[in-house]
Amino acid sequence: MEFEKLNLHPDLMKSVNRLGYKEPTPIQEKCIPLIKDGKDVVGQSLTGSGKTAAFGLPMLEKVVKGKGLQALVLTPTRELCVQVCDAIAGFGQFMRIHVTPVYGGVGLQPQIDAMKTAEIVVGTPGRILDHLERRTIDLHNVGYLVIDEADKMFEMGFIEDVERIISQTPKSRQTMLFSATMSTMVLNLVNKHLKSPVVVREKIHVDKSLLRQLYYEVPMYDKFSLLVHLLKHKTAELAIVFCGTRHEVDIISRNLKVQGVDVMAVHGGLSQNKRSYAVDALKKSNISVLVATDVAARGLDISNISHIYNYDVPKTPEEYVHRIGRTARAGHKGEAITILTERDHENFRRVLSDRTLQIYKENMPSFQRVRFVVEERRERTGRSFGPRRSGDARQGAGRPPMHRGPPRGEQRESRGSDRPRRSFGNEGSQGGSDKPRYREPHFGSAG
């Protein structure tokens, strides 16, 4: 099917052609006609499926220039806010529709000024609520509401904010909700606020002919050394390394820099400028590795990613598929590699409950043990996690201590920063067979 058959406005078609789009993706082909017809829509799709165009193109057709704020798009993170805003502005460039991003971490006044002439606002819940409380945004004429990445929005703790924002919009509005997964909270919101919605599910699958899924099982104290070896010797193009917490992102990225890896960190604790700079650097190939949390990476549109590394194993099959879906795109091959330690076994079992996933155990390569420093202050005082002197009874002769992850009290990144509410490796190690699935005590036998 070609875009022309969707009967879009000529100015939108001009933008679509200029951007080089030839055929709509499945989610676009199904959603655009429904939204054009005024239906409420629930779309289940992953990153990279083209959902921004799926709601952005028909929404632009309905918005009238010069009639004030008519459409609101809610996104969970700043990066996604900027990305969605840029995409919609690109689609509407010949219609001269004013689209503005609204997110935390930057000044309020420039956003207030921009919203005075905006027909479409793309924002994060916390900052939109800030403006509502200050009465610097008026949603009474919003006819189109989009809730993007709803599952991640609620995981970050924005459910009450979203409910309050919805209450400020007209009940006659058209509502579109997109989510990678359909949790109970997402379904409750759909049932409460959408009118007879049409559900569109994109077929979620992993192209096994293009994406190779592997895992290594290592002791905790070998984990970082193996990552360094893989990045330096097995990764020819760009890579994303996923960690579970902001703290761990900082530690891993800092240690990778010490090992000579061109790397930057992305997580919700960084300023917007730093986060945008890191993403742009990866897109322009100024760096080769991005270390990120799931929350910060949600919605990032970066091409040419050849490797995804799960330094921490995600909690669910859906999150695993969401991560690895950032590689093996547009006909290119990719690898998704999980570095598995004892503490990851429970999460890995849950991932493997999806019987469609084929994750094979890889034999351990020979690699050099490298120094891993948990805290900079320890390095300055001479205390670091490296091989101890022989005779150390607590760790054994020459054996480094276990890398224990984030300090006590550190949580996996779950709430947005937008609006806060109050290893060293032995030289070589034996792997197992390369069959998928799980059997105690090792991962690898056929199930």
Image: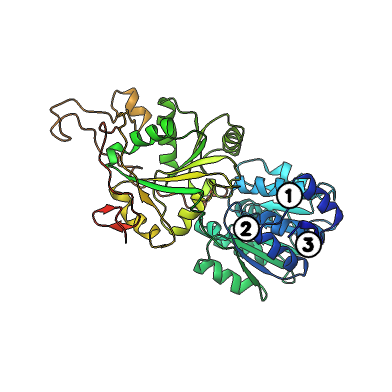
Q: Is residue 273 above or below residue 1?
A: above
**In front of the other: label 2 or label 3?**
3
Q: CA distance from mark 2 to mark 3?
A: 22 Å
Mark 1 or mark 2, whichever is nearer to me: 1
- Name the kind of residue labelled 2 in the image: Asp
Identify the amino acid type marked 3: Leu
Q: Label 1 vs label 2: CA separation?
A: 22 Å
Q: Which residue is mark 2?
A: 148
Residue at image mark 1: 21
Q: Residues within 10 Å of mark 1 (few under 14, many from 20)?
A: few
Residue 17 left/right relative to 124: right
Q: Which image quadrant for residue 383?
A: top left
Residue 91 locus on image (x, y percent): 77, 50
- Residue 6's disc number: 3
Q: Secondary structure at mark 3?
A: helix
Mark with earlier residue (2, 3):
3
**Colour scheme shown:** rainbow
